[in-house]
Every structure is written in structure tokens, then in C-alpha cells.
Image (cartoon, grey):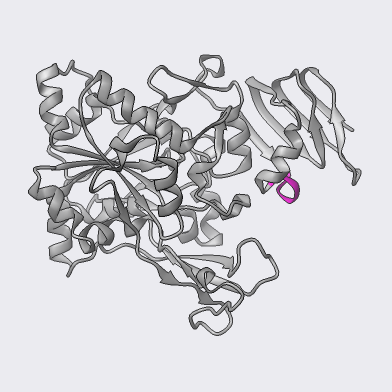
Amino acid sequence: MKNAAVSDERAKQLLDQTVVLKLNGGLGTGMGLEKAKSLLQVKDKDTFIDFIAQQIISFRKNKGNVRSMFMNSFSTSADTKEALKGNPDLLKEGWEVVQNKVPKIDAKTMQPAKWPANPAKEWCPPGHGDLYPALAGTGMLDKLLKDGVKYMFVSNSDNLGATLDIDLLNYFVESDKSFIMEVCTRTEADKKGGHLALRTSDSQLLLRESAQCSSDDEKAFQDTDKHKYFNTNNLWIRLDKLKEVLDAHDGVVPLPMIKNSKTVDPSDGASPEVFQLETAMGAAIESFKGAGAVVVDRSRFAPVKTCADLLRVRSDAYEVTTDYRLVLSADCNGKPPLVDLDSKIYKKVAGLDKMLGEGGLPSLKHCEKLSVKGKVVFEKGIVFKGKVAIVNSADEWKVLKAGTYENQEIDM
């Protein structure tokens, strides 16, 4: 992709035909959250929603007006609206499209799950692949097209590096492609994520997710030399071409089904096992003729899926730009630190909060890998460099004193 300068007049023309949509349907139940994941504090007291609002406001102030939307679920709509009350310009008509909901499937009976203690937990959103039927079914797609909106940029609300980029937008328009996926070069930290592939029969791009990979193929799936690029879930979509795909397939975009194993009440591991049937929006690349991909750097990819991710972005390994993007520190030399936390203790945010205590956020910008096993509390003033492994085999919490730890194993 060539980053040719885009004139102000050209930028305005493009922005008039563009909408930015943030995927915001997740509760973050895997991290022990009960509200919209985007309400989680990322840097200091600022949440994902705070960052997104400031990104849009900054963009409109410095580059030009652009439409913005959220795709919420039935679980996050009210929380999001409440959080955006201080920014009424972001709550104008058409500010959201709400995902559909589907029943969770009882793993034993294969029937819709029942949970009388809280019937709301019998339902779930069907993954971000629901973007396409939600846009069509709510009439939002037709409304956007009628209003002259031709291009949509979509990204996850927990990826604060994914802001609207004028150069990428201009490239998308000039390429005349129907669909573009932003991809990054895979590292060890990304080997379990979905990767881009080429179908040998017709050279059509497609997306493979780990949930679609057999155990026999797992090693090859995670081979970063064989499969070099992973999906950032930053997508550029031609809305008129989306309309064509929907019309050609009776109102749906054909996407492979993903079966996720959960418990009916995510906060109660002893509740009945269920399957949640979901689809991934990136898989739609297979349905768009003339689809493409563009390799972007890590400045456009800083997601938070786990508490390890949260620790990484809260640390000095990531910095906040003047336009409120979260970008990797230059000291990291292009590679984010690999953080491995004991899943039994730090799977939920409460465990991470215990680790960090009162201001115990460590420096990670010179850290290659940090591994923590056992109950460890960080004292304020800790610096990790290189590869550091910490092990506490005892059952009680132990404090790691302030100081610099470099290329060492620490047995507490």
C-alpha cells in the first residue's frame, strides 16, 4: 500500500461516504465481568468507551466529520448509552445497531438451555458475525446506503489502536476492492488466533479460526512461518457489495459456525455446560469477490482479551497518542511483551487487581516475556527486563519487592 498524501478536499469527500462502527457486544464474562467489557478501565481511570469517544471527537476536530456507530448486544446497549451521556453528539439517531440473540444449547440434551435462577442467561449474542444480518434486519444497511454511505470501517471496541485512517480509507476506495482485512505478522503471542489462508482451488482468501482447527492440525495451525498473518478484526467493507452478497444468499452472509463450550452462567463454573453457536465477521472475506488484505503494523492492534493483555496495555509497554490511540512503545522494538499469567489465579480481573495492589503496575517496555505462577503481589517500582519467570508455590500471597529484575527466574 502506498501512503500517498490525501488532500483535505479528498478526505472530506471520502468521510462523507464513510461510517465507523465499533463492535461492543461483549460482557467480558471470561474475565469475570458482569457489565459491558468496554467499561473496563484501561489507562488510569479511562475506560475503552472513554478512549473511543475521545478518538472520534479528536478525529472530527482535526480531520473531518464522520458517522460513528456501535454494535451493541442486548446486554451492553444500556451500559453503553449511560457511559456516553457526557458525549451527546455520539448518541444521535442511528448511533447503534443491536445484535440479535440466540438460545444457548444444553450440552447434554442439545435443546435450548434452561436456567430458572436467571432466565436472561439462557440467551447469548451469536458472535460478531451477526453484524451482517443485524445491519440488514434492522434496516440500517438500507438507511446508510440511502444516505450515501458506501464504506464502513469496523473494529473491536477493545482494540484502541484501530482508529479510522485516511490513508487506508483512500487505499480501500482506490483499490475498488469489496472487502479488506487488516492483518499483522504473527508472533509467538498470536499463534492461537485466527489466520489468513488461501484456498488452493480458486485462490480465494479465507479465515481459519482455532475453533475450526482439528487437534491433529493444531501444530501446523500455530506455525507462524507457515501461516504468517493473523486477522486483526479491523475490516473495511463496501456496503453496496455487502448488499449484493446478502441478496445473493437469501438475506444472509454464509459463515462457518463456531461452537464454543461455556457454562450457562459464566460466573458459576458449576452451572450446566452449554454450547454457544457463533460466527466470526472476518470469515465473510470468503464471500466477497475481489476481497483483499493489507498488512499493518502493531500500532493498529492492541486488543484486550485476557487479564494478561490488560496488564500489558496498562503498563508502559503501551502509550497514548495525542489522538487517543493506544500504541506500542518504541522501546519495545515492534514486539509486545509476552505475558503469561497463572490462569487459575489471574483469569478474572479481581485476581489481577490483587496482583497490582496499590499502584504496583510494573514496567514492561524492556520486557520480552513475563511469566507469573502462583499468588504474587507486585510492589510499586518494579521493572522487568528480558525474560523473567516468577513462581510462588505456597498457597498464600507473597510480595515481590520493588527493583529491577532482568533475565532471571524468581522462586518465592
Q: In this picture, is 187 found above or below 273? A: above
Above or below for 190 versus 251: above
Q: Is 344 contained in the magenta span? A: yes
Question: Residue 102's spot in the image, x, y percent?
Answer: 41, 70
- Say which quadrant the C terminus sits in: top right
- At a point 18% along the width and 15% down the height, the residue shown is 5
Instruction: Name the spot of residue 238 as percent of width and height, x first.
Output: 17, 45
Quadrant hosting residue 101: bottom left
Q: Is residue 291 left or right of residue 99?
A: left
Q: Quadrant of the N terminus?
A: top left
Q: Quadrant of residue 20?
A: top left
Q: Position of residue 226 (x, y in %)?
A: 45, 42
Q: Measuring 72% from the left and 35% from the top, which residue is drawn there?
A: 371
Tell me if residue 280 comes above or below residue 248 in the rendering: above
Residue shown at the point (49%, 39%) measured from the top left: 224
Kindly report the secondary structure that dominates the magenta region of the rendered protein.
helix
In this view of the protein, can residue 233 be seen by the observer? no
Residue 346 point in image, percent of width and height: 71, 45
With 7 as the anchor, is 374 left or right in this view?
Answer: right
